[in-house]
Amino acid sequence: MYTFPKNFVWGAATSGPQSEGNFKKRHQNVFDYWYMQAPNEFYAGVGPDTTSNFYNDYENDLKLMHQAGIKALRTSIQWSRLIADFETCEVDQKGADFYSRVIDAMLANGITPYINLCHFDMPVELQHKYGGFESKHVTDLFAGFAKKCFELYGDRVDHWFTFNEPKVILDGGYLYQFHYPLKVDGPLAVQVAYNLNLASAKAIKAFRELYGQDKSKKIGTILNLTPAYPASDSPKDQAAAEFAELWANKMFLEPAVLGHYPQKLVEILERDGVLWEQTPAELQLLKEQTVDVLGVNFYHPFRVKAPAVSPASLQPWMPDIYFDEYEMPGRVMNVDKGWEIYPKALYDIAVNIRDNYNNIEWFVSENGMGVSGEERFMDKNGVVCDDYRIEFMKKHLKALHRGIKAGSNCHGYFVWTGIDCWSWKNAYRNRYGLIRDDIHTQIKTLKKSGHWFHELSNKNIFE
């Protein structure tokens, strides 16, 4: 039997752009724009127009989530929906009213709101005018947007987060071309990484100016931590893993929690001539505005080996000149998604946070399994019998339980996701929800995992 702490939070995560649909938005985000320009680049040509129709169906959706045992919901406020004028931070009243109604409906259903402010959805107007987070001016605009959110909803929301997976903004938009603006520019990615940390610190400062004395309210960030494991004990593989850990995890984790960048990463980037532009005042801000709480998204490990081509070769600077990805023979896979399943990494994350990051309060803010063609697992009553998802959660929860028993300060587990949602360029190729969404009819029904999660949430225990 695995019993979790008394006040452990059982939740689910989604985002505004992946659930709401593009209804009645004054502005477009980068995905709305990209789909409008190139719909064929999205799986089956399905874009963000409707998604899971949360904009129109949130009351029913939240009732279903309550039935699935979801007691906290992490979602995001879309900058492009809430704000009418990005420079002045004038609010779009329709957008503001929508989010107010959603928060009220969460509370009415016994669901605690965990609100995130950026989930890859840069307003395209700011991307085109300034380069999005390529620009430090946009970090100020983001802080202004954040302040409006705190002012509008801080009376009902105690849990706030500045970013979701900032590293994916780099990977998708500036390194590997799976998110708009589809650039490949390693040095620019380095500057964007710095600016993302700066934007987070500025938003945290705005939060503290409003709620700094209120200990019931907390602000954090959400990072996709993927522990870097070397392919072998050889010094070259170990060095590859060390840099991969610096780049993939510590570049965001250390500023957020410790208030500074890893010195070795700074030395490497400076030596390579690609270090970000920084000022002493900005570094002081990062030092002062660390997070209260950390959200950790975990899906798969990050296995690396020494690069086949020396980083000393004449080539454009990219982070992966220092490592090649390694596919471990015999690994267990989620074949549909192409990710290794390795629950032990969640224990390793728990211990790492305990030992190296002041044992800061944290929670699993995403963990889940995306599977294609789930209709093949539907029984005669129309219920998706997703035992594979239940087993995936059980294995990760066992690893997490072990970490908590070892003293790691974890307060919750949020599954990705409550209701099948639109997943960027992959659209609905894989389904992750505890609740099935028939995207043609928008009829939503609990899967077997939804019933299982209900029992887990209510009893705080599983076998």
Image (cartoon, rainbow, N blue to C red):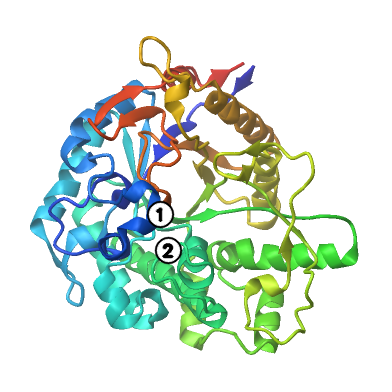
Q: Give the quarter of the image for residue 421.
A: top left
Q: Is residue 167 left or right of residue 214?
A: right
In the image, farthest residue toward the left: 93
**Residue that badge 1 annotates:** 425
Contact, CB < 8 Å: mark 1 with mark 2? yes
The picture places residue 88, in percent across and down from the top left corner, at 17, 76
149 and 332: which is toward the camera: 332
Task: Inspect this view and state whether residue 15 appears.
Answer: no
Q: Residue at x 18, y 64 (%)?
A: 27
Tell me the element at label 2: loop
Which label number is shown at residue 335? none
The picture places residue 102, in percent across and down from the top left corner, at 20, 41
Q: Is residue 447 left or right of residue 309?
A: left
- Give me the C-alpha separation between circle 1 and circle 2: 8 Å
Q: Residues within 10 Å of mark 2 (few under 14, many from 20)?
A: many
The picture places residue 260, in percent across and down from the top left corner, at 59, 72
Which label number is shown at residue 179? 2
Q: Residue at x 53, y 49 (%)?
A: 296
Q: Residue at x 64, y 51 (%)?
A: 353
